[in-house]
Image (cartoon, grey):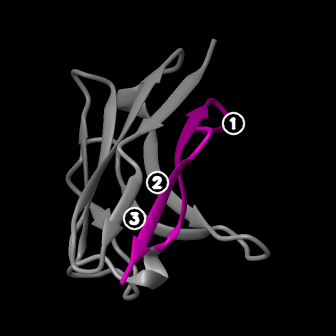
Amino acid sequence: QVQLVESGGGSVQVGGSLRLSCAASGFPFSMSDLNWYRQTPGKERELVASINRAGISTNIPDSVKGRFIISRDNAMNTLYLQMNDLKPEDTAAYYCNAIYWRGISTLAYWGQGTQVTVSS
């Protein structure tokens, strides 16, 4: 059974930091590319960070570049998102996502999300 369980969300003031975690099980974690997305009501999910299987290559969009850091621990099957200098516009539900290529098939897995609220 595939599981992605996010944790670490909460309420924080502007300029604060949070570290999100995503514990994975039930699929080949170390062979999967991983992403963090966020979503606010009425809007599409927005990609905020990506990391490749080895954890060597990352992609951070300009909207959060310099503030968000993605990392992974393949031994612990865990994905992280360090969020610094948080702003009110970072308020959203944050989701971890895993992409696993099995042969010619692409499998995508999602967590249930964790809420981050940034207040001034």
CA gap, disc 1 and disc 3 = 25 Å
User: Which residue is nearer to you in this view: 73 or 31?
Assistant: 73
Considering the numbered disc 1 on the image, is that residue within a helix, a strand or a loop?
Answer: loop
Q: Residues within 10 Å of mark 1 (few under 14, many from 20)?
A: few
On the image, the x and y values in percent for residue 95 come to 54, 50
Q: Residue under circle 1?
A: 104
Residue at x 44% of width, y 47% of height: 34
Q: State yes or no: residue 110 in magenta.
A: yes
User: Which residue is nearer to you in this view: 102 or 84?
Assistant: 84
On the image, the x and y values in percent for residue 48 come to 45, 69
Q: Marks 1 and 3: which is nearer the front? A: 3
Considering the numbered disc 2 on the image, is that residue within a helix, a strand or a loop?
Answer: strand
Residue at x 46% of width, y 66% of height: 117
Q: Residue under circle 3?
A: 49
* Quadrant in the picture for the N terminus: top right
On the image, the x and y values in percent for residue 3 come to 56, 23
Q: Marks 1 and 2: which is nearer the front? A: 2
User: Which residue is nearer to you in this view: 118 or 61?
Assistant: 118
Q: State yes or no: residue 26 in magenta.
A: no
Residue 35 circle label: 2
Q: Residues within 10 Å of mark 3 (few under 14, many from 20)?
A: many
Q: Earlier in the sequence, mark 2 or mark 3?
A: 2
Residue extending furthest toward the bottom: 62
Determine the main secondary structure of the stretch shown in magenta: strand
Left or right side of 95 for 85: left
Q: Earlier in the sequence, mark 1 or mark 2?
A: 2
Marks 2 & 3, CB-CB < 8 Å contact: yes
Question: What's the residue type where badge 1 is placed?
Answer: Ile
* Quadrant in the picture for the C terminus: bottom left
Part of the protein shown in magenta = 91-120
